[in-house]
Image (cartoon, grey):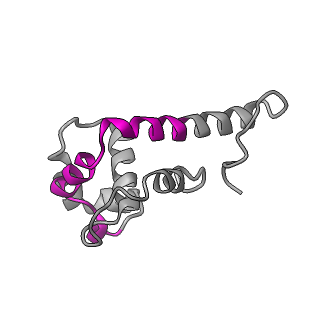
Amino acid sequence: METIGIVALLLNKFTGLKKSAKGVRWAICFCRALYFFFDGTSRHLCYFDDLQREEGYAAVVQMPRRQMASSHAMKRFFGAFRMFHAVAFRWVLQQLFLWRLQQQKPGSAHIDHRYHGPG
């Protein structure tokens, strides 16, 4: 995820969302949410508590255990999003789609100059 810059895109589009400086960093929450969706083992938010206790899982996702967000932190994270944030998510997905299209057929895709993927 760091290689393609998805977390940087998300943080850029959702800068004003976090109201408090305390708690888990938003970059970590975005990573944890994406890993949760990619994994698909559970659909329940309480699964974050199980993953938080798993030393092996923390090693696999290369995240220190102290940074593993609990289910309560993730509920606050998901609760911060409203319907009007859908436009920002669509923009991020469009940028990733266009970047990937450029990787497949470089001569046939127009890329928005604000994002060119890694490097």
User: Who is closer to the viewer here, 3 or 54?
Assistant: 3
Is residue 73 toward the left or the right of residue 102 in the image? left
Is residue 95 toward the left or the right of residue 27 in the image? right
Tell me the quarter of the picture where residue 83 sits. top left
Tell me the quarter of the picture where residue 69 sits. bottom left
Instruction: Find out whether residue 91 is within the magenta segment.
Output: yes
Q: Residue at x 74, y 32 (%)?
A: 104
SS assignment for the magenta stretch, majority: helix
Q: Where is residue 1 shown, x and y percent of the image?
A: 52, 51
Q: Residue at x 30, y 45 (%)?
A: 81
Q: Residue furthest right?
A: 107
Q: Residue at x 23, y 37 (%)?
A: 42
User: Who is closer to the viewer here, 5 or 13?
Assistant: 13
Q: Where is residue 84 shown, x and y percent of the image?
A: 36, 37
Q: Is residue 6 above or below residue 106?
A: below
Is residue 96 toward the left or the right of residue 50 in the image? right
Q: Where is residue 94 shown, x and y percent of the image?
A: 58, 34
Q: Which residues are magenta?
A: 64-93
Q: Residue at x 21, y 53 (%)?
A: 76
Q: Where is residue 112 shown, x and y percent of the image?
A: 70, 41
Q: How many marks?
A: 0
Instruction: Find out whether residue 56 is within the magenta segment.
Output: no
User: Who is closer to the viewer here, 56 or 33?
Assistant: 33
